[in-house]
Amino acid sequence: MVSIEDIRQAAERVKGAIRPTPLDRSDNLSRFLGRPVALKPEHLQRTGSFKIRGATNLISRLAAGTEVVAASAGNHAQGVALAAARAGLAATIFMPTSAALPKVEATRNYGAMIHLGGDTVDDAITAGRAYAAARPDARFVPPFDDPLVIAGQGTVGLELAAEAPDAEVVVVPVGGGGLISGVATALAATTPHVRVVGVQAEGAACMSASLAAGRPVTLPGVSTMADGIAIKGPSALTFELVQAHVDEVVTVDEDEISRAVVLLLERAKAVVEPAGAVSVAALMAGKIGGSGLAVALLSGGNVDPFLLLRLVDRGLSASGRYLILRVLLSDRPGALAALTARVAAMELNILAVEHHRSGMQLAVEQVEVVLTVETRDPDHRDAVVEGLREAGYTVELVR
């Protein structure tokens, strides 16, 4: 197990390696979510996530000449690579082939040797452990299954106890459970009145499944945009700590994650990766009980720009902020102009218009128009569709 003294010792070890991430009490998010909300911005941490804490705590204890080995989709990889570089040690990192290119390049730029292989983080962990086991001077640094790593992540909890002693609940992203294990252990010892709630992606809810089964469970597969928490199963150690100190673990779906990413961009001016935004996603979805101060831990900000574009697109759609419609028109002069005039009369901004004279289910005398328009919210979307149908148009909601 991990104790509060282990975490306090870790805080001394990581002091020179980490960047301060003071709590941000967000008026914008508080108004939007209807309760006091504060953000712990670990996405602004060195290497873009909390992972530098645990990596530094473990690697600082290694002997000179040790080869540091790790496996990760990106955040742990970067934390280990930087911690090893600071300690003057060589680092070899195994990453799945699905790892985002910016994360791979960032890890390489910290001086690590990269091995790409396997489809998931779990595949990379298996390869990394085998590599380290075959070399007498190598040490595998696990992403979550190690007391020193957990104690390092627990330094976030020590900071939260000092920064938000008035918190009602702390909401923490959960993959394999290293972060929440450390945070919950620290809070249980310092501010036991604070509830700790973990959040997982529905497509990788290994901790939820484990708690339901009463033992660590390994999922047959994972599927989520939140690659930073896409883990098939927790370890016995993290499961035990979560079972002992965490009040509840909830899940969020992909649309809820996308909406949270967009909300953080708009209201908090924060670029947060999907895994780092699940805490806010759970608050937005009404899955965190209570009305007092909720602290949402933003665990990482290493998001691929191309993924961010898709996330914004999906998040705006899920939030009812824009609408894509398929409208059938008579193939005659002025029909398209009449449709756009009707849309303008409804005070809608048209983002895109596609006009097709051939396609599936089109009669000879028909044309298809695909409209993308801005809307205010889901109620406005519904009103737009109903208004066009009342005007006699054949309308199909695309998205």
Image (cartoon, helix red, strand yellow):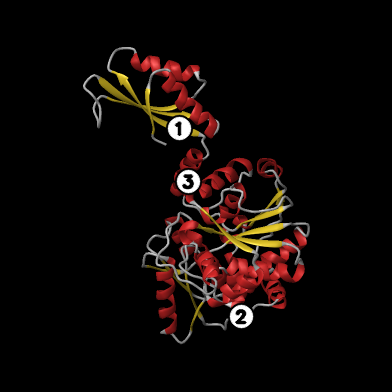
Q: Which residue is mark 2?
A: 61
Disc 1 crowd, CA 10 A, few/some/many (<14, 14-19, 20+): many
- 337 shown above or below 377: above
Q: Residue furthest left?
A: 364
Of callouts 1 and 3, the N-terminal one: 3
Expressed as whole percent of the image width and height from the top left, the position of residue 157 reads: 69, 65
Give the camera-side residue of 80 and 290.
290
Q: Which residue is mark 1?
A: 323
Give the camera-side residue of 387 and 282.
387
Q: Which residue is mark 3?
A: 311
Count of numbered labels shown in the rendering: 3
Say what amino acid the circle numbered 2 marks.
Answer: Arg
Give the camera-side residue of 108 and 350.
350
Say what amino acid the circle numbered 1 marks.
Answer: Leu
Disc 3 crowd, CA 10 A, few/some/many (<14, 14-19, 20+): many
Q: Are marks 3 and 2 in contact (CB under 8 Å)?
A: no
- 207 shown above or below 338: below
